[in-house]
Structures are given as C-alpha cells and as structure tokens.
Image (tube, coloured by chain):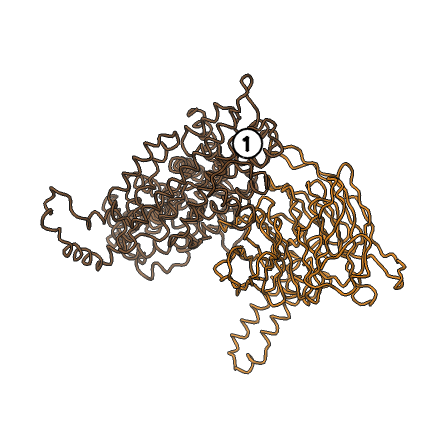
Chain colours: A brown, B orange
Amino acid sequence: MQEMSDRLLNNKAAASIAWAVLLLPPSTAIFVILSKFSVLHPIQTISECFSMLTSATAIFSFILLCGVIIMVGFLNFEYYTVIPTIACSKIALFGQLLHPRQLVNSLVHCIMGMIVAWCSAVTIGFRYETLGHPCAQTDGYHQMCLNEYHLILLLGGAFVGFSHSLLGVIHNMNYVSFHTVQQYKYLRFKGCLPLVVKCSATQALYSVRNFIVVYYFLGYIPRTWICKTLNLHLGSSAHPLDSIAGLLDLSLLYHLWISATFLLFTWYITLLLFRIFLTEHIHFRLNPTDHQILVLSFPKFQFLALQDLALLSQHSPLRRCEVFSLSQPGGHPHNWNAISKECLSLLADLTQRLVAYHDTVATNGRAKSLSSGSERKTSSETSGTLISQKWLSIPLTAPFTPDLDSPFMSPALRRLAAPVEQGSPWYGTVQSPHIMRRVKNFLAKRVLIVYLFNKLPEASSQALFADSQAHIWALEGLSYLVQASFSEDQFGVVQTTLPSILSCMLVLQEAVDRHFKLPHASSKPVRSTSSMGDSTYKTLRFALRATLKTAIYRITTTFGDHLNAVQLSAEHRKRLQQFLEYKE
Amino acid sequence: MFCFSTYIPKPAHTVMRKHGDSPVICDLAVPKWLSMSSGCILALLQWVSSFHGSLFPHLTVSSLCSSEDMIAEFSQVLNWSDCVVRAFAWHPHTDKFAVALLDDSIKIYNPKSATTPTLKHRLQRNVAVVQWKPLCASALAVGCQNCLLVWHVDPCSLSTRPSAGCAHVLSHPGHAPVTSIAWSPSGSLLVSASPMDTAMMVWDVAAESCVPLQRVGGGGVTFLSWSPDGSHVLASTPSALFRVWETRMWTCERWPCIKGRCQSGCWSPDGSRLLFTVQDEAVIYSLTFTNTPAAVPSGTSKGPHAAVVVADLSETTFSTPDGDIIVGGEIQSLAWDPRGERLAVLLKGDPRAADRSPIIAVFKTRVSPIFELLPWFSRYLMLLLMFSLCSQCWSSGRITHVPFYFLSASIPRLGLSGSPTLPHVQERPADFANQSLFTEFIS
C-alpha cells in the first residue's frame, strides 16, 4: 500500500516538474525580450533576441535552467507538507530557520539562484556577460579586471534565492492546501497565473531593494575575496558599485529586478504546478482493504483519500451505493463500517485534543507546565488507535502551555524560570519565591527576550487545528452519507451507527464552542494576498466550526422528527433539539 | 454584445475634463509646464480609456451611472432606488425573514421571538440582495455597494443591535457593487456577482478566501441562481449572453441570447429544468439539463441545444367587473416554489400608463413526468418586489404574505406550499377582501 501511494505521489510530482520544464521556453523567451528591449531600436531588439536564442551559450544556459527547475521541483516534493508547522513564538521560528534541513534548503536555493543569475547575465549579454574583462593598467600591461556588473548580478541571484528560501519558512510556502472548489488543472493554472506574475514581480522588487542595501554596506567583502582568489584586478575607471552613484544606475537596477523576477517566476510556476497536481482529486477504489489507506499511510495520502470520500459522498450516487452495500457472502456492511469508524476516530481524536488543551488552559498551565507536553504524548500513545500514530510525528503538541498572566509562555523559558531541578548547581540557591520573581522581572525587562519568547497570539489555536482539513472532510463525508442514506440506504446499515455519529458530532461541537470562548481563538487573522504562501491554515478552525454546524444541520433537516427515535443521552438530545428548532 | 457602448456617451472623459479645466485650478496661477504636461497626460489617459470602453462594455455602463444606478438596473427588484424594501429573504428552513430597508439597515423578523434585530454596518450601503445560508440558523449574506457581508445573527440572542463584529466583510478588489449572490444548497460555498467584474467569485466564507471564475465575453455578471440540487449555477451577464456553470469542476456552457440580456431565472427543485426570461421579451424560456449520475467527474452534463418557449406573456386584455385590464409584458423576476408546483412571475407593467401597474402572475406547474405550466391566477397589484413565492413587498414598505393552500399533486394531502407554516401578514391591503377564488388570506 505504501509503495502504491508513493508511486502515485511520485508520478504527480514528476508530471508537475515536466510541465514546469515545458513552460520554461516561453517564459525564457519573454524574459529575453524584456531584458533586451530598447524603445529606440525595436527591430534591432527583435533580431538580437533571435540571434541570442539560437546561440550555443543560450542553449547551454537553457539546459542549466532546466536542471534548476528540476531541482526546485524535487525540493518542493521533498519539503512539502499538508499539515503546516506553526511556530508559536519567535524563538520557535528561529529554530525552524536554523534547522539543519532548512539550512541545506537555503544553501541549495542560494546556489540555484546564482546559477539562474549567471544564465540571465549571459542572456542579457552586454556589460554583464563575463566575470573578468581585459583592461589596460597604467603601466601598459594587459590584465584581467573584475567585471563588477557580472558579480552584482550573481550575488543578487544568490540573495534572492536565499531570501526565497527564508520567506518560504516564514510564510509556510511548503504548505499545500486543498481547495474547496474543484477545477480542471488547466483552468486552475490559468486562474492563478496573474497572481504568480504579480507575486514574483513584487517579491523581486522587495528582494532587490534589500539586496542593494546589503551590497551597499557589505559589497566590498565578496568583491575583494573574488579578486583575491581569481587574481583579478579592480577596474579603476568606473564607479565601484557599492557607492551611491554606482547603485543609482537605472539600467542596472532594471536588470537586477527583471532577472530576480524571472528567477522567482520560474520557481513559483514550479510550485504552483506542483500544488495543482498534488491536490488533484484521485479516485480510490472502494473495498475494505483499500480503506486501510485511511488508517495506515502518512497524512499526505490520507488527505487525498478523505477528499475523495467527501466528494463521492456528495456527488456520486453510484459510489454511495457501493458504500451502503453488504458484503457477499456474509452480509456485512464492511465499507460503511470502515468509513464510519475511521471518520469517527478522527473526530474523536480532535475532540480529545481540544479537551486536553482546554484543561491545560484552565489550570493556567502552571501545575503541569513542564510535563504537559510529554503527558500528552503518552496519552495518545496509550489510546492505541492506529491513526494516533501519526500525530506523534506532528510537532504541534509541544508548545501548548500558555501561561496567561506571564509574558513567558514558551516551555523553553519556563524551564529557566521554573524551580530548578534537584541536583543542579543552582538548587538551594535560587529557590525562594522572591528571588524567582526577581529573576522573572529581570528577564521581563529584557525586550529582546520578551520579543523572542512571547507567544504569538492565536498561534496555539492555529496549531491545534493545523490538520483540520482532514476533519472537515470527515465531517462532510459522514454527513452527506447519512443524508443520502435517508433515501438510498436499502439495508439500513447507517442506522446502526447514527447514534454514535450524532453523539460524536455533538461532543465535538461542544468542545469547539468551548475553544472559541478562549481569548484569541475567535480573532480573525490578517490576510496577506500578495504572497505565494498559502494562509488557509490560519482560518481552518473557522472552517471546521462552520462545517461542523452544517453537518449537524444536514442530518437534522434530513431526518427531522425521526431523530427522536434515535437513542441518545438526555444532554445530547437537548442539544439536538436546539438544532431541530434552528436555534444554534 | 457591445450594446451598452452604443447609446452611452463617454462620461469618464467629461469628468476628467471637468477636473482639468476647472476654474479653481486656473485661478491658482499654475506654472505653464505643469498645465502642459498634465494636459498631455490627460489626453493620453483619455486615449487609453477610450480603448477600455470598447473592450469592456460593462465598464462603460458603470461610468455612465453611479453604482447605485447600476444596482437599480440589474436588481431583481422593480424600482429599486425608490423602494422602501430593497431586499427580502425567507430563511430556507424556518419561519423568519430578513428585510433590507432604504436606510441601509436590515431587520430580521421572527414570529417566535419578540426581538427584531436590526443590522447596521458602516460598509452596508445600498443593499442589493440578501440571502440566508442554507443548513445554518444564523448566517445571512448581504450583497451591497462595496463588498459582501456575512452576518452571524444568533437566533437565541436578545440583543436588538448585533455589533459590527458579527459581520464578516468579504471583499475583492474590483468586485463591487455586488448585485447578486447565491449560496450553494449545501451551505458550503457562496457565489457573488458584480456587473463591474468579469469574474464571478466563489467564496469559501469561513476561510474568507475566494476563487475567481472568469470567462471571455459578456462583461460582468449580473444575476446568479443556484439550482436547488446544487448541480448548476445560472450566471447572466449584461450582454446578450448567459452561462450555466456546472458545480463539480466549475466548467460552463455559453448561452447566447438573440435579443437582450437574461433578466431572471429559476430552477426546478430537482435542478433539471431552468426557466429564464430575457430583457425586452415577454416570454419564458425553458432549458432542460439531464444530470448524468456522475461516477466519473469528467465532462459537463450534456445539455440541450436550444431553449424552448414555454409561456408567452405578451399583453392581453381581460374584462373584469372593474373594467378592462391589460395583463402581460416584460418580466422582471421569476420565483418557483421549492416543491415545483407554483411559479410566480412579476410583470413589469408600464410605469407611464396608469392602468398598467406591475402584476404578479402565478402559474401552476408540474415538473415530472412531463413539464406543465398552467395559468393559475393573476392579479394586479402595486407590487414591486417578490422573492419567496408568497411574500410580496410593496413600494410603500408593506410586506404581504399570501399563503397558498392547495392540494399538492405529488402528496395527496392538504398542505402549505413553499412557505413556512405560520403565515404572517405585516399589514393587510384593503382590497384583498374582494379578491380571489383560489386563495385565502389570513391576517
């Protein structure tokens, strides 16, 4: 099963990379035209472009660009996630940035940025073409001098690649979200293309601005280093480029910007295609063994299976019929049992998480501030269901210890402030509460520390619901199937699980309602539109709440007063009555 | 297709010229080079915008009128700008309704509660349309001049003025004014349309994100209607073209009309039949869609090749005890009751002729096994707006509820159709007593 899912995802990634490579020639052609365009000699521009595009260096650099695209696609595939990692404090974010895996990513992006910049330098030609150029010194000898224009372009590319990688972490660019609106790949691509152009142009502008500032102050370091290692001389004639006069060269700025735009555009296109291919709807065969997919495999594939479930339950009567069917021989509703059990355990897991979080908040995170993280892990281990295995790999449980009245809400700092363990050299010296308070005040005065360790508002709430797309689909799938069962379920297989479905949803509803009463939980995040990062995860909790209500209403409106015959606890019946009267 | 650009002057230019040549600027002894250069820029802008007008006809419409005029033009409400009741919506499941008034407030009436919440928001101006979210008790979407608002009105709350925090603002650059919205029957998505925007927006309301759906041609989207089974969406444009979107993969069929734009439309309960009317024509067209039980998501549903005329409502004269009355003419809006048994048609009448007041005609309909449309009764009223089958909102601000009692064809029992179980008449018109053969009026 694992092999199959791997192969499927690999194929999707490969297809997206292939398309990205196919789209490279047109985007390169546009880049060439834009970079060489001169208003005064339009015809000359065109002829130059043609000769450029057919030259040997162009073909060589094109091959290099293809290699870069393939590499970017590979990195996208390697680093993507369907469950975003949410940093709950600034220090956690720095931790993410300095993670070795991320450092490798940044380094590779840096190198690739430089390669793309070299290709664009060669393409633009003119004064950017080579790193060294012969120059006559005062004593008459011909020497090789450094071409700083070439160097600045290369460094610019490296800088843009590096900042792309950093921003990828900050904006969660590796997060792949699933759209509620299904569209054909081509139409989705077409719809997103203007956004990609806009994003790459604006992002290139910002990156180039930052790069120029950096180069103005630190540009001499790489320049002298290059000169030393390659035994080149600094040209004495022109302005050095890390001066105001040198950087105010409009043509240079334009070329820096256009090559950065080209770089980002090709990478964003690769990312976009990857997202489109990956989130495309897959049809799963419905038989009980296949539903092990829901259970066993890793979240990426489980998401696709749940998406398919939500869609089939909504749109295809034939496949619903298969769900409601009985096995031959034996007459057991294996399909329905597998689906309902899986979805219910998913929902129960979320309920459990919400309740645990709420308990932690209620005790103000004090009593078990240090142990809560580990306790949670053990509790989910002991719960023993198959799916809980994968939650362990998700790093969202660690920072759930908000201490509401103190500015330090991260476990790392609490360890500093908490009573020191026995056996440590501090034990015995720093244990009186007065001193503790003083230590706390001392730390609180340090603005930097507060800045780093302060918990970002609503981040813990976001982290709690980070994987809620799965729950949303589970709720949709279940509720649509239950709705359809009213008329389509011939054998009454759904009826047997209806009480547990209803009570599961009602319990979750209660937990979600309680969660939204917490501070920051119901505040809406700021939306950023001009970024390739997907911020859907910030609003997943609202989506979950709305879907949950709709799911319960879908069942109550379909069944109406028949629900009175369903066995439920008195409390749940009371809540259900609210729904039946449209008062929720 | 470019019908709007023909009879419209180029007001954008005149506005600009007003700015450029205004005496205020002349008085201020502007340097010559500045006035020269600004004149050049102005000329360039005019030249560019002249292209704009020919490329996007709907934008010329917008420059002709304010967005208020545009809402009035494309609203389903007759005489929208003067009407006290600007929009009206029944809750799809329970008996409460929302009314948008001329003063930009929205009131929610519920017979079971004494409180009447009034919704006000600083962005809620010139409300064109309101609609309740299906499968939800509280959410009400409001399409207005600059944005789209989704109110969450807690049905249990006793407050009469829900705070602005209860409203979520959905806006997208260039997507205003919103003249039509439609919730998906499953309550998960919301589509909105603006005559100024060539794209139709599909909103995921909880995530506040939208997917623009754009196709070439037509310019703008004016009216939307989601079929009750959720499979199709009708989207009409300001030109003689409308589209029918299929909602699984969001592909569309183009339907060019011969005469004018598609004015209004409604779907049969099973989503298999679309009735629509075209501006300047007094007929109702019908289109049928066969829903392939789609196990495979590929392909749109194979629709028909041409629309069929199912009713001709051109002017006819009836003699009544009060004298002859003329019935018929252009159609403003259509509404079909949720069971598919009655169809109400709002006829525009002629505002200049005294005896040609707007009229609602009601047809008895049957969808299966074959489609039937029979005149049921028609009455002349000063009706300006009609949304739900049985509620009529008058220009004076009266809302009349006319409960229809009839034997349902499919279920052999006496029932109320298409309306909540409790009839509520806000105010009973005086002339109701001497009307009607088939209806009863309850005050």
Left or right of residue B123, residue A235 in this image = left
Residue situated in front as seen by the camera: A411 or A512? A512
Question: Which residue reaches farthest front?
Answer: A570
Q: Is residue A84 visible?
A: yes
Tag count in the figure?
A: 1
The answer to whether B64 is drawn above or below residue A97 in the figure is: below
Question: Which residue reaches farthest top?
Answer: A329
Residue situated in front as seen by the camera: A355 or B433? B433
List x then y, in percent, for residue B204. Answer: 52, 48
Q: Amino acid at mark 1?
A: Gln
Identify residue for label 1: A495
Neighbour tally class for label 1: few under 14, some 14-19, many 20 plus, Cα within 10 Å: some
Q: State the residue at coordinates (41%, 49%).
A: A514
The local secondary structure at tag 1 comes to: helix
Left or right of residue A4, residue A433 in this image = left
Left or right of residue A81, residue B432 in this image = right
List x then y, in percent, for residue A298. Answer: 40, 31
List x then y, in percent, for residue B390. Answer: 71, 54
List x then y, in percent, for residue A425. Answer: 9, 45
The answer to whether A270 is drawn above or below residue A282 in the figure is: below
Residue situated in front as seen by the camera: B291 or B306? B291
Give the position of the C terminus of chain B as an image quadrant: bottom right
Residue situated in front as seen by the camera: B347 or B219? B347
Q: Is residue A60 visible?
A: no
**In the rendered structure, the residue with mark 1 lies on which chain?**
A
